[in-house]
Amino acid sequence: MNTQPLPLEGLTVVAVEQAVAAPFATRQLADLGARVIKVERPDGGDFARGYDTAARGLASHFVWCNRGKESLAVDLKDPRGLAVVRELIAGADVFVQNLAQGAAARLGLDAAALCAEHPRLVAVDISGYGAGGPYAHKRAYDMLVQCEAGLVSVTGTAGQPVKAGVPAADIAAAMYAFSGVLAALLRRASTGRGGPVEVSMLDALAEWMGHPLHQGMHGSTPPERTGLAHSVIAPYDAYATADGEQVLLSVQNDREWRRLAEQVLGRPELAEDPDFATNAARTAHRERTDEAVAGALAKLTGREALTGLEAAGIACARLNTVADVAAHPQLAARDRWREVGSPVGPLRALLPPITLPGSEEARMGSVPALGEHTDVLLRALGMTDEQTSALRRDGVIA
């Protein structure tokens, strides 16, 4: 059987990007075959390179978001450096930037200006709060946007709100930028014109808040913070087992509750008890419901609890650690792990979630060193070694 090429093969993306939102978006494009040229500052590059040294000396955020890219280290504040990037954009299909609000426009690199100059270009502006409005120029880090979007208000325990353990606002914006690029490329295929794409972190995460927003806006009260429990479903929580594991289970309807009561709890009478027979009753008597479930699971090991729950057709899971996920049998069985190159050698990485049967496997290229591709890119633009040496001497490139 002939293998299809990756769908973005032949497309070139130029990205003036930093942190997570834009880099994670463009990494999706690179995985699907696009050539991604990452523009970085000569003096340290993308500041995410310095977040930590957890990935064998490299920053874990950077390794996660930047595989498969070419690094061009150039000073955009120098007219010569800006001219290099503008020349690259002129030959590109997609441009993505997430500079501080207003910075791209001052350089003439905002989506509207670039698309007016290059009608076939798809140009993406990623911002914290959008181009207008009273928050346009506020600093927008992930935790701050999680708070502004209300995610923190519904995450945590009754006594303690907490942010999500992953950069949810950054990821949300990245994935809408990614899908926005794909939509704009489809439009270009039929009209010949690319056009600007705008994504803000607040808009993206506010969309993800749809359930609590609709619950609160239309006459009810927003969901309370309930830790691992669910605000309107019971039982739905983590329960300790005899060997110290935490097993989560979720009963979605009264038929499942009957099976849980009869086959796992050993208390069939709870299926008929008016205090437990319906989800509304179980939620109203949540403490007693949880006591009944916790008491039964505390007598079982984690393995016994999961086996019994699965046999009864009850949705369940282990409360895994990061180490557990790295060794997860389902990921191993489905061959989801690969190695990618980096300046410190091969690093383990997951295949991207999008699988295209019949196509080449995702192109999981190496994590670039700062400025690793500067000379090659400049030579491709026709610069001589003398010209690049002069730029390097003046600190315009690295």
Image (tube, rainbow, N blue to C red):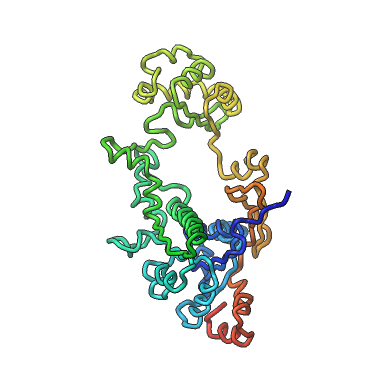
What is the x, y in percent for residue 297?
52, 24
Question: Residue 160 occupies which quadrant of the picture?
Answer: top left
Q: Residue furthest front?
A: 190
Residue located at (44% from left, 74% from top): 117
Q: Do we see residue 174 in this rendering? A: no
Residue located at (54% from left, 27% from top): 241
246 w.r.t. 394: above or below: above
What is the x, y in percent for residue 73?
55, 74
231 w.r.t. 372: above or below: above
**Image mark count:** 0
Residue located at (57% from left, 61% from top): 66
What is the x, y in percent for residue 317?
54, 33
Residue nearest the viewer, comparing 98 with 177 = 177
From the image, which quarter does the C terminus lie in?
Answer: bottom right
What is the x, y in percent for residue 318?
55, 34
Q: Residue furthest right?
A: 1
329 w.r.t. 200: above or below: above
Direction from residue 235 to residue 389 in the image, left or right = right
Residue nearest the viewer, comparing 8 with 221 = 8
Residue located at (52% from left, 81% from top): 396
164 w.r.t. 316: above or below: below
Q: Residue furthest left?
A: 219
Direction from residue 364 to residue 238 in the image, left or right = left
Residue nearest the viewer, comparing 200 with 8 = 8
Q: Do we see residue 7 in this rendering? A: yes
